[in-house]
Image (cartoon, rainbow, N blue to C red):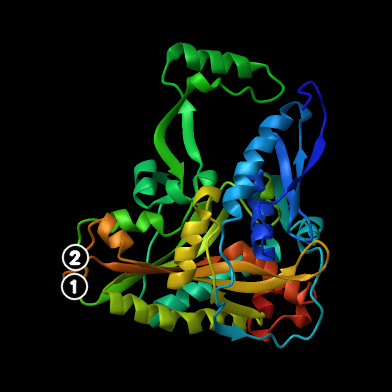
Amino acid sequence: MNKMMTGTVDVTVDMPKKVAPEVAADIVKESVFVSPHLERISVADDCATAVLHIRDAEFTDEVVDKAARYLAVMAKQRTGFDIKCYSENIRRDDGPFQAGVNEEFIKRGWVYDYGKGQIAYNGPVLKVARLVNEIAGKLYEENFDAVDGQFPGFIDADILHKCGYFDSHPNQATFVGNVLEDFDALEEFRVANSCAEGAILPPSEHIHHDGMCLNPAACFPAYPTLEGKTIGQDGFALSWLGRVFRYESRNASGLDRLYEFNVREIVFVGTDAFVARKRQQAIPLVTGLAETFDLDMKIETATDPFFATVSASKKFFQAAQEVKNEILIPVLDKAGNKKPMACGSVNMHGRFFGEKFNITAADGEPASTGCIGLGIERWVLAAFTQHGFDPMRWPEAVRDRVFG
């Protein structure tokens, strides 16, 4: 192709094979990580062709090559696994779903969107967020005697490596850097910004990475605190509100998909039987939370959005072993159609973290772990989508605390 071309260009390519609609959706969402010169890939309705929306035509050949390799590995994903529903709640409110919730939040001044997946919020949005966290925390304390805790937002890269995160989700990791501990580098940075109209970032050779990351999964910081320990009795539970960071590139959008968000987490640690039992006991509690807010909700078999080159094998393992369930609450897409939104997950890790962090269960075997994470901001979006902004449509159990 002509490398002297400039401007945007669309290139249509054949898929390696016709894919299932759910695979096509993954291809579209994860395509933002293919190349900085690619805006996105869209897949035709027949799921047999795709269009590469290239930002800079000068890099067309490079983008086409990367996209071909990306599509080849994504097309290997297997589908057709039985989707099991483990629990369901049906809302009593028979009113219509509210469209344009994110925009209405901003219009009312309840949300400020900084861009790039960061928001500030107040008013009823903040009240619902606090309520979801508070009610879930109380349920975990009352039913599991969960120890409430607090963990940092930073996490050592060595811990993420031990947790397998870089192998599964390298695209979502965020590394923390600082200006090199060098007099000249610091002075150069200071002078550059002393009279600049906008921030002047230091050159890459002046950025020092000390091995710290922003935490991308709420449960990860808990395991190092248990390293080398033996868990008493059958096991125990700990719970906390975690700050989580996942780089979403151009996928960041409203409360739907944030770079920085909050998760009410509970982790079970102990024998295999203990963790399996607690997982079963926890599912009705999540359903009870949905009932309190009067939300349509299902808990179903699911898989994680792994990086393209490992997606097929890792998704196959998760689906075959049924180790992940998603908490799905319907909202509206931009076209006004209902779509399930993952507002949390119920996960079984087996003995993975017990072996990695040398945590021993009471039976002498490596400890088993499991966790449940509730995405607070997504619960907020789901509640306002399903009940709108009329307080009288909201369940009496929470109405006054949200709008009072």
Residue 29 in view, yes or no:
yes
Residue 248 in view, yes or no:
no
Q: Nearer the viewer, residue 308 or 221?
A: 308
Name which residue lies at 50% across and 84% down.
Answer: 284
Q: Quadrant of residue 48?
A: bottom right
Q: Position of residue 169 (x, y in %)?
A: 50, 49
Name which residue lies at 65% across and 25% down.
Answer: 199
- Which residue was labeled with disc 1? 362
Q: Nearer the viewer, residue 257 or 273?
A: 273
Q: Quadrant of residue 352?
A: bottom left
- Residue 370 placement, left or right of 263: left
Q: Amino acid at mark 1?
A: Ala
Q: Amino acid at mark 2?
A: Thr
The residue lying furthest to the left in this view is: 364
Name which residue lies at 68% across and 19% down.
Answer: 196
Name which residue lies at 69% across and 59% down.
Answer: 18
Q: Nearer the viewer, residue 319 or 329?
A: 319
C-alpha distance separating marks 2 and 1 = 7 Å
Q: Earlier in the sequence, mark 2 or mark 1?
A: 2
Dot 1, how many residues are within 10 Å of its Cα: few (below 14), some (14-19), or many (20+)? some
Tell me whether circle 2 and circle 1 mark residues in contact (CB < 8 Å).
Answer: yes
Q: Position of residue 348 (x, y in %)?
A: 40, 69
On screen, residue 334 above or below 339: above
Q: In the rendered structure, find residue 230 and report the number of the disc placed on it.
A: 2
SS at mark 2?
A: loop
The residue lying furthest to the top in this view is: 184
| Quarter the C terminus occupies | bottom right
SS at mark 1?
A: loop
- Residue 36 placement, left or right of 97: left
